[in-house]
């Protein structure tokens, strides 16, 4: 094998032109990629590029996708350890390549040992500035937004990182169509108020003000996952909330008992199968409170509640919550949109939305956001 003796080693802080996507801390030695869709982006000349990763996990290994000039060229599991991954080689040295290395898997709240870090780069080329895109969009959601089942055959039923995709995902598709930089805050099974199995602490609002507060364990805490997030550093033009699917699911699943207190929690059904009014009202209150929290942290953003890819039983409650919020606060920069439901043709792995469902959702959402952003700017 011919050795490329022109490769130069760069610690991440030495590459001023490196662009980081996704919520993280200030640290660049190393850089921790916490959330799905988090990425490093580079414009680089040269024939070859390597990246030094550090992948750790007890159960759920991280996956990455590599995009060159906005096209996915590879996707891989990162096995345990600190090592070099070749991103490309043999390319035309004088041509500038736009490279994005994207974390394909969500923050794993159930695996305190899971972390993905980037230490350094090697290249025989020169780094150039990556321009900011004209808009910024933040997506907040559950397994749909984490891209669970967006890749893999419909027959797949294993809950494993392999079936998560940050790319075959309405978030990435919408951002690309709008030419926007974006971030994702999402967790499978979680809701506005409760998880799919009635656990009241598995809700996104509780951790929204932290860098990645839903991660557990001493390692993640030491990495700054529980630190307050600096909202001023990245203010989105639009915040898309795709939550409610698991809150709706909780009406259909058994009660959850807190192992520490013995208290049980359950979203109840009436005898005729309709949702218990008190429990729907609690959901509406949680949605209302989350809108207040979102507005406090994202002062200029238009907030869009987008929901419906796995049925839409909570739609009336979402409309009511948004309506009350707008009336009580006078905030007019809020809207609700129903996304196309997943069908037998568009379903993916694990009975979740597949790539076709994400594509349809992205088209609907893009059209809605385009009008808002034109008005917004």
Image (cartoon, rainbow, N blue to C red):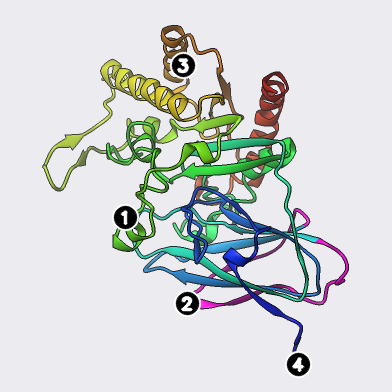
Return the residue at label 4.
1
Residues at marks 3 and 2 touching, judged by CB atoms closer than 8 Å = no
- Residue 65, percent from left and from top: 63, 61
Return the residue at label 3.
322
Residues at marks 1 and 4 touching, judged by CB atoms closer than 8 Å = no
Q: Is residue 18 shown above or below 229?
A: below
Label 2, secondary structure: give it: strand
Return the residue at label 2.
81
- Residue 110, percent from left and from top: 34, 56
Q: Earlier in the sequence, mark 3 or mark 2?
A: 2
Label 4, secondary structure: give it: loop
Outermost residue on the bottom side: it is: 1
How far is the residue under mark 2 from the one under mark 1?
Answer: 20 Å
Residue 95: assigned label:
none
Q: Residue at x 50, y 48 (%)?
A: 23
| Nearer the camera: disc 3 or disc 1 | 1
Q: Earlier in the sequence, mark 1 or mark 4?
A: 4
């Amino acid at each position: 094998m011919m050795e490329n003796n022109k490769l130069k080693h760069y610690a991440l802080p030495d590459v001023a032109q490196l662009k980081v996507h996704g919520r993280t801390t200030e640290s660049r030695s190393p850089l921790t990629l916490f959330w799905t869709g988090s990425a490093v982006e580079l414009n680089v000349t040269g024939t070859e590029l390597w990246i030094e990763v550090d992948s750790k996990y007890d159960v759920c290994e991280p996956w990455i996708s590599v995009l060159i000039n906005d096209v996915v060229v590879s996707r891989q599991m990162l096995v345990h350890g600190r090592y070099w991954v070749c991103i490309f080689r043999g390319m035309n040295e004088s041509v500038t390549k736009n490279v994005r290395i994207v974390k394909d898997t969500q923050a794993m709240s159930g695996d305190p040992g899971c972390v993905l870090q980037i230490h350094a780069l090697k290249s025989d080329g020169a780094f150039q500035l990556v321009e900011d895109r004209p808009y910024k969009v933040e997506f907040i959601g559950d397994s749909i937004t984490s891209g669970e089942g967006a890749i893999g055959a419909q027959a797949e039923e294993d809950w494993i990182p392999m079936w998560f995709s940050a790319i075959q995902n309405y978030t990435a598709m919408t951002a690309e169509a709008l030419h926007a930089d974006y971030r994702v805050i999402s967790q499978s099974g979680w809701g506005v108020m409760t998880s799919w199995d009635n656990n009241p602490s598995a809700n996104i609002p509780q951790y929204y003000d932290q860098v990645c507060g839903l991660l557990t364990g001493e390692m993640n805490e030491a990495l700054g996952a529980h630190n307050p997030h600096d909202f001023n550093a990245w203010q989105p033009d639009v915040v898309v909330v795709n939550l409610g699917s698991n809150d709706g699911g909780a009406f259909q699943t058994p009660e959850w008992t807190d192992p520490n207190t013995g208290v049980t929690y359950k979203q109840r059904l009436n005898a005729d199968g309709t949702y218990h009014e008190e429990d729907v009202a609690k959901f509406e209150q949680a949605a209302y409170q989350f809108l207040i929290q979102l507005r406090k942290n994202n002062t200029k953003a238009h907030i869009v509640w987008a929901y419906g890819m796995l049925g839409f039983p909570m739609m009336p409650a979402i409309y009511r919550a948004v309506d009350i919020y707008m009336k009580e606060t006078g905030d007019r920069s809020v809207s609700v949109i129903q996304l196309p439901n997943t069908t037998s043709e568009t379903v993916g792995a694990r009975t979740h939305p597949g790539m076709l469902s994400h594509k349809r959702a992205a088209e609907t959402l893009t059209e809605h956001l385009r009008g808002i952003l034109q008005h917004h700017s």
